[in-house]
Amino acid sequence: MHSIRLRGPWRYEVLEHLAGEDSVPTTGKQKMPGDWSEPLGADFRGTVRYRRTFHMPTGLEEGQQVWLAIDCVDSNATVTLNSTSLGSLALNTETGESWRHEIQDSLLPTSELIIDVTHPAQAPGPGGLTGEVRLEIQTVKPRPVD
């Protein structure tokens, strides 16, 4: 398996402001992974849209698949690639497993990934896209023919 990390800078936009300082910037850039305490404050609660473009991996061979993997968000997130919803994920510290979705057929020469992270008013600690986001390129072994 080969991984391509989608680190920063990511663009962010505040979609909903539930709690925290009123004077936070509503848009900006942030390196990932990371919580939003630096740009928005540790007590910010609400929904923030993170947006990142990336190019299609080159040199893909027959039998290889591309997966999107997200290690952690604080607290809940929805994931969209090129205007297609890939699903949602929630903070899961018990299993430590990454959220994964096969994206081979959804890739464009330049793709746009959007992750909307929601951290409710009663949630502890700062929210954000706190785990690694990466593309995983895996070779799929052909199934034996009976």
Image (cartoon, rainbow, N blue to C red):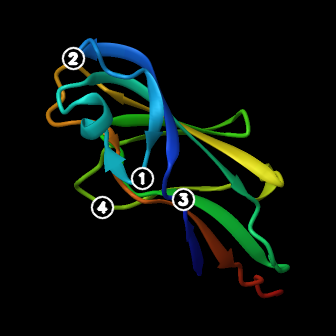
Residue 141: x and y in percent read 72, 84
Mark before the other along the chain sequence, 3 or 2: 3
Q: Pick whichever of labels 3 and 4 is earlier in the sequence.
A: 3
> Which element type, helix, strand or loop, lies under badge 3?
loop
User: Is residue 119 rendered to the left or right of residue 7?
Assistant: left
**Circle 1: residue type:** Met
| Labelled disc at residue 6 | 3
Whether pointer 1 and pointer 2 mark residues with C-beta atoms closer than 8 Å, the reply is no
* Element type at mark 2: loop
Q: CA distance from mark 3 to mark 1?
A: 8 Å
C-alpha separation, residue under disc 1 versus residue under disc 4: 19 Å
Question: What residue do we see at 80% from left, 78% from top?
Answer: 63
What whole-number distance in Å separates the C-alpha atoms at marks 3 and 2? 29 Å
Task: Compare marks 4 and 2 and give the one earlier in the sequence.
Answer: 2
Q: Nearer the viewer, residue 97 or 134?
A: 134
The disc label shown at residue 21, or none: 2
For marks 3 and 1 on the same chain, the one whose residue lies earlier in the sequence? 3
Q: Position of residue 12 (x, y in %)?
A: 48, 33
**Displayed quadrant of residue 76:** top left
Gap between marks 1 and 2 measured at Cα: 22 Å
Cβ–Cβ under 8 Å for marks 4 and 2: no
Closer to the eye: label 1 or 4: 1
User: What separation in Å lies between label 3 and label 4 (alpha carbons)?
Assistant: 19 Å
Find out whether the residues at labels 3 and 1 contact each other: C-beta distance under 8 Å: yes
Which mark, residue 32? 1
Do the residues under discs 1 and 4 have CB atoms within 8 angstroms?
no
